[in-house]
Image (spheres, helix red, strand yellow):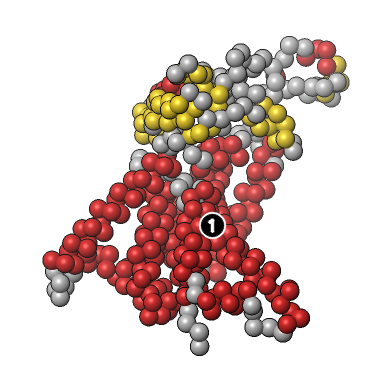
Amino acid sequence: MSKVKKVIVVFTLFIAFLSIKNDTFAQVDSAVVPVDSAKVAAHGEVVPAAHHEGSEAKEEGFNITSFIFHHISDSHFFTLWGHGEHGLTLHLPVILWTNNGLVTFNSSAFKFNDDGKVLVEQNGQRFAIAHNKIYYANPVADAHGSYVSHELVDGEEKVTNARPIDFSITKNVFSMLLSIVVLIIIFTTIASSYKKRAGKAPKGLQSFLEPIIIFVRDDIARPNLGHKYAAFMPYLLSVFFFIWLNNILGLVPFFPGGANVTGNIALTVVLAACTFLIVTFKGNKYYWGHILNPPVPWWLKPLMIPVEIFGIFTKPIALAIRLFANITAGHILVMSLLCLIFIFNSLWIAPASIFFAVFIGLIEFLVAFIQAFIFTILSALFIGMAVEDHH
């Protein structure tokens, strides 16, 4: 396993180098190379910039950053195959709460635009989409044809238009709802099987998932929660299978997979908040007593009490960031390896690129399980610390 980690580290550093230095490999058309003041001709003679008036801008190299973040970010449609208008696309509904009430329409109205240049008029209001976010459109377009305004904030260009409250069914929302429906069907079926086959050997789907359920019970819940484990098993099972299923769906490159659900910080924050609420409201007097009146000398209490209170919030923050960062990093690494083909603009690199992308992709299936396990066992640990009896 150490060798695998070394390979991953080496290729991660390699990709990081390429992402910084990708202009080195970008092909440039010698006929359209821009100049500022003077240009050196092929035979060494200096050619004034005036001789190049009217020439086009340099052809940009492959932008690995925008390509990767486009594929791991949320979207208002699923691409089944092809690209844009030349492919088959499943457009998802847009649901907005605006100044004039509820507005709904299909995301196809934006015509695959994502830079604010397409207007959609609904209920007497005009909307434009930029960077996968929907804004109220300006009355007129700017010099670039965009109906949204941009402003540099800390060196980064941001849209300043007001936004309606967005309840749209995006890729992430669709995948999350799909996983919920799948889990409800699976576990109601298994629960029914347990009732009908009480005292008998498991069969079918029940026999497939029972070892995993027992694993969560015996290796996660019982060691951390003791005799109180049964009360928290529904939550631990739900969060384990929800994270695991969405991790797997995120690795499937075709519909209904491909959405980066657990790589979305908003979702991981909500899951961590659920653990935080259980810990907060189920914590007993000994748990709160250890926080508000820690068993240390009196002169250390002014220091330890703020530290203990701060620790209440750092635990769920660590839960949220750990899951988000690990899943997102895996997707970025796989996409970076595939991008080597376009960075070098050569088919000779394709075999190595695809081999390592598939290799890391297979490891990601293991990571999908490990991250679900880690989130669940840490949640059980935090809950166990809160409900532990005083000894």
Q: How crowded is mark 1: few (under 14 residues within 10 Å), some or many (20 or more)?
A: many
- Residue 67 in the figure: left or right of residue 158: left
Q: Residue at x 50, y 88 (%)?
A: 391
Q: Residue at x 42, y 56 (%)?
A: 243
Above or below, 310 against 85 in this view is below
Q: How many marks?
A: 1
In the depicted view, which residue is nearer to us: 22 or 382? 382
Q: Which residue is drawn at 66% across and 39% down?
A: 22
Measured as percent of width and height from the top left, residue 199 is found at 15, 75
Residue projecting furthest to the bottom: 391
- Residue 227 in the figure: left or right of residue 137: left
Q: Does any portion of residue 112 appear in the rendered image? A: no
Q: Which amino acid does label 1 sit on?
A: Ala
- Residue 283 in the figure: left or right of residue 189: right
Using the rendered view, name the quadrant where residue 138 is placed: top right
Measured as percent of width and height from the top left, residue 79 is found at 40, 33
- Which residue is label 1 attached to? 320
Q: Residue at x 39, y 47 (%)?
A: 176
Above or below, 35 against 307 in this view is above
Above or below, 237 against 248 in this view is below
Q: Is mark 1 on a helix, strand or loop?
A: helix
Above or below, 119 against 74 in this view is above
In the depicted view, which residue is nearer to us: 200 or 281? 281
In the depicted view, which residue is nearer to us: 61 or 264? 264
Measured as percent of width and height from the top left, residue 279 is found at 49, 67
Measured as percent of width and height from the top left, residue 59 is found at 65, 25
Q: Does any portion of residue 146 appear in the rendered image? A: yes
Using the rendered view, name the quadrant where residue 205 is placed: bottom left
